[in-house]
Amino acid sequence: MRTIQAVGLIAVVATMLGLDLSASAESPYPHRPIHIVVPYPAGGIVDIVARAVTEQVGRDWKTAVVADSRPGANSNIGTASVARSDPDGYTWLVTGPAVLVNPTLYKDAGWDPLKNFKCVGLAVWNQSVALVNPSMPVKTLAEFVDYARKRPGQLNFGNAGTGASTDLTAQKLFRVANIELANIGYKGQPPALVDLMTNRMNFEVVSLALALPHIKDGSVKPLAVFTEKRVPDIPDVPTIAEAGYPDASYLPWYGIYVPAATPDDIVQKINVAINKALENPDVQRQLAVADIPGKPMPLDELADLMKADYEKLTGVVKAAGIPQQ
């Protein structure tokens, strides 16, 4: 009885003083598991990135991190679910350029990238490479462009998904080089790459981590890497600028996002934690194995990068004449 009376007295005093007992009783952020939504199939590049970076954040915070692969509708299902989630810092999205460009490609994507999301961390830059089948009678990208110009619409482009980073990279090259290829859609990069190796496809842009083993065994022929510098594993392959198409340069990136209404103090704490994780030697080793480098970035630079890429990618979509679905 005395205990009940004491609790009641505390409540009365708290009310008189204008204190919020529920707020004071709640532990500082984070005090429960972080839910990571990856809107792509498990085992892909984005999933590798999500686990490498966010699991390290969990270890640093001594907080559980639960990764949830939620593919579907070219990443729209998982992305829209995060846009609708509570802005409390406990639901994160790890994704690539699709978060910025899909509302331009789909009428009912379910979000506005600049209004519904804040980018709280750069996961990695996704390096890619332009590939042809070894039987293609070209040795350089310039020779391929000349070959394609003489055969408008006759060569096939294996597209891993409309709006995917590799698709956008290829579309920018096609526009800059003024070539037209037949667009053949696939559900992801692996099946498209298989068809390139078996000469069912003529040209593809593929994530470097996925392509490297096949470049090394001669199953595919690399023409240029979409990187600022040459890749040490394939030093003889020129960058897209060295190949003669600097305006086609594009280096996609995977970011970590939270709903835009997430409080600033939580956003700042997440950003600091992600940047720390990216500098962890174990994380760097995991990303190096997949040839997907990371880079710590402050929030203002991330906001600028997000806006610049949104404008760039929507421009690519419109210039390529990709119809809205």
Image (cartoon, grey):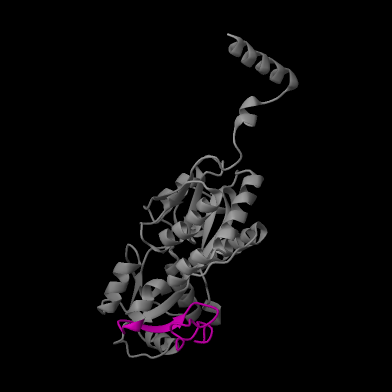
Q: Is residue 254 left or right of residue 143?
A: right
Q: Is residue 88 left or right of residue 136?
A: right
How many numbered marks, from 0 up? 0
Given residues 91 and 240, the one toward you in this image is 91
Q: Residue at x 43, y 84 (%)?
A: 234
Report x, y in % for residue 274. 57, 57
Q: Residue at x 52, y 43 (%)?
A: 90
Residue 29 shown in magenta: no
Given residues 295 and 208, the one toward you in this image is 295
Please identify the quarter of the rendering in which residue 14 is found: top right
In the image, is residue 238 above or below residue 22? below
Q: Residue furthest front?
A: 2
**What stretch of residues is rendered in magenta?**
216-245
Q: Quadrant of the N terminus?
A: top right
Report x, y in % for residue 154. 32, 79
Residue 238 shown in magenta: yes
Q: Quadrant of the C terminus?
A: bottom left
In the image, is residue 160 above or below residue 25? below
In the image, is residue 119 above or below residue 315? above
